[in-house]
């Protein structure tokens, strides 16, 4: 119950909300078939925190959408993450567990040092640019989504 109150208070105050248990995310910019997000993520090591940030960015695009973006305001797949992960477990295992998500990351530029934050957890903030066109084509080629117009 306290977590729900904190979440609702965060929304009312316009504070960043923690996503996927990893950190905060905000929209930066977009260009033709690309999007840049600022992500704060946690990990025991800087490498782990950066991987968590990149995975969170991909999950945000696939399952949540990015408010403020013209290209991906709504999620690419839908909001039922558990259903998609179950129905297409082989694809998502390869994407997240085997690191294929990195092929869609065009750049990952840390904007803060890897250090303890106010909650005493080690975190890093990074700007991540994602290739939306390649991600969508991959989803289509693996029959996770239909090709537009077909």
Image (cartoon, rainbow, N blue to C red):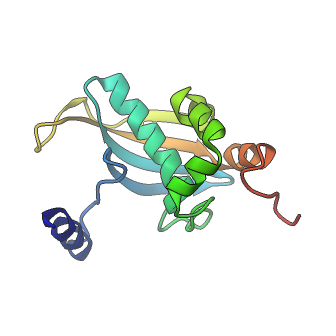
Residue depicted at 57% across the width and 44% down the height: 130
Q: Nearer the viewer, residue 130 or 109?
A: 130
Q: Furthest residue to the front?
A: 86
Q: Residue 135, position in %: x, y?
A: 67, 45
**In the figure, residue 105 lies in which quadrant?**
top right
* Quarter the C terminus occupies: bottom right
6 left or right of 79 in image: left
38 left or right of 77 in image: left
Q: Residue 98, position in %: x, y?
A: 56, 26
Residue depicted at 45% across the width and 50% down the height: 37
Q: Nearer the viewer, residue 97 or 135?
A: 97
Q: Residue 108, position in %: x, y?
A: 47, 34
**In the figure, residue 72 lies in which quadrant?**
bottom right
* Quarter the N terminus occupies: bottom left
Is 2 above or below relative to 127? below
Q: Nearer the viewer, residue 112 or 59?
A: 59
118 left or right of 4 in image: left
Residue depicted at 54% across the width and 65% down the height: 69
Is 47 above or below relative to 5? above
Q: Residue 82, position in %: x, y?
A: 50, 54
Q: Furthest residue to the bottom?
A: 12
Is 117 above or below relative to 115? below
Q: How many marks?
A: 0
């Amino acid at each position: 119950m306290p977590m729900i109150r904190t979440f609702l208070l965060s929304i009312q105050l316009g504070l960043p909300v923690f996503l996927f248990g990893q950190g905060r995310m905000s929209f930066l910019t977009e260009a033709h078939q690309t999007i840049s997000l600022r992500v704060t993520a946690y990990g025991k090591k800087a490498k782990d925190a950066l991987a968590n940030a990149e995975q969170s960015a991909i999950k945000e695009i696939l399952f949540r959408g990015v408010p403020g973006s013209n290209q991906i305001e709504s999620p690419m797949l839908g909001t039922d993450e558990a259903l998609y992960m179950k129905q297409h477990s082989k694809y998502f295992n390869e994407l997240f567990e085997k690191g294929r998500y990195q092929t869609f990351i065009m750049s990952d530029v840390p904007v803060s040092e890897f250090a303890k934050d106010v909650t005493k957890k080690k975190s890093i903030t990074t700007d991540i640019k994602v290739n939306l066109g390649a991600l969508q084509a991959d989803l289509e080629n693996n029959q996770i989504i239909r090709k537009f117009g077909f």
